[in-house]
Image (cartoon, rainbow, N blue to C red):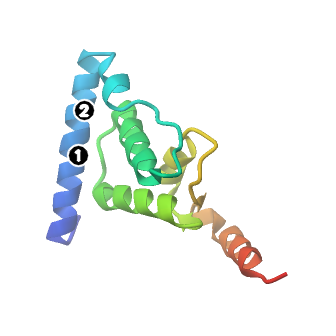
């Protein structure tokens, strides 16, 4: 259950938009590549790269979004685009890792990889 009205509105907007896009894509096979092409990474527009490829992935998956996915979507876009390291749940990690490479996105970790994330951050921050 989504507790905050803002989070609920974000979830509903994403669910409705992706549902509409998915239905349109099923009716017209060319639509997806015209409206949401698989973008290559552009360092001057990293958030566009992440946003478009993530929406495209959700359309292709055509799975109903779960409660909280609106906020998870926002977190995935912002964290993977603007951080060096990020923790996402395994489904969002897999989605981000499916993007075209090379790209300048953060190294993504799931819950089972948090010890590795801490070690990588410490190694990155080490002056040696």
Disc 2 element: helix
Pick the residue in front: 20 or 30.
Answer: 30
Residue 100, by quadrant, is top right
Residue 69, by quadrant, is bottom left
Residue 5, placed above or below residue 64: below
Residue 19, placed above or below residue 127: above
What label sits on residue 15 in the rendered view? 1
Whole-percent x, y for residue 98 in the image: 55, 40
Which residue is at a point 43% across and 40% down the rendered structure image?
A: 53
Mark 1 crowd level (few <14, some 14–19, many ≥20, 10 Å Cα): many
User: Of all residues shown, which one is farthest toward the front?
Assistant: 44
Which residue is at a point 35% across and 32% down the rendered structure image?
A: 36
Pick the residue in front: 111 or 123.
Answer: 123
Residue 25, by quadrant, is top left
Q: Which residue is mark 2?
A: 21
User: Of all residues shown, which one is farthest toward the bottom?
Assistant: 127
Which residue is at a point 77% across and 75% down the rendered structure image?
A: 123
Whole-percent x, y for residue 117 in the image: 66, 70
Disc 1 element: helix
Q: Quadrant of the C terminus?
A: bottom right
Whole-percent x, y for residue 46 in the image: 47, 52
Query: Which numbered disc flags the more N-terminal residue, 1 or 2?
Result: 1
Mark 2 crowd level (few <14, some 14–19, many ≥20, 10 Å Cα): many
The answer to whether residue 71 is seen in the rendering is yes
Q: Which is more foreground, mark 1 or mark 2?
A: 2
Describe residue 57's horizontal placement relative to residue 96 as left or right. Answer: left
Q: How many marks?
A: 2
């Amino acid at each position: 259950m989504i507790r905050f009205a803002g989070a609920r509105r974000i979830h509903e907007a994403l669910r409705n938009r992706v549902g509409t896009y998915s239905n349109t894509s099923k009716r017209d096979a060319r639509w997806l590549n015209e409206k949401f092409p698989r973008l290559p990474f552009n360092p001057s527009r990293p958030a566009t790269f992440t946003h478009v490829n993530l929406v495209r992935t959700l359309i292709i998956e055509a799975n109903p979004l779960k409660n909280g996915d609106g906020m998870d979507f926002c977190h995935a876009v912002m964290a993977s685009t603007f951080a060096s390291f990020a923790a996402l749940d395994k489904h969002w990690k897999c989605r981000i890792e499916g993007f075209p490479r090379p790209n300048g996105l953060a190294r993504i970790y799931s819950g089972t990889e948090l010890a590795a994330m801490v070690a990588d951050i410490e190694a990155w921050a080490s002056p040696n």
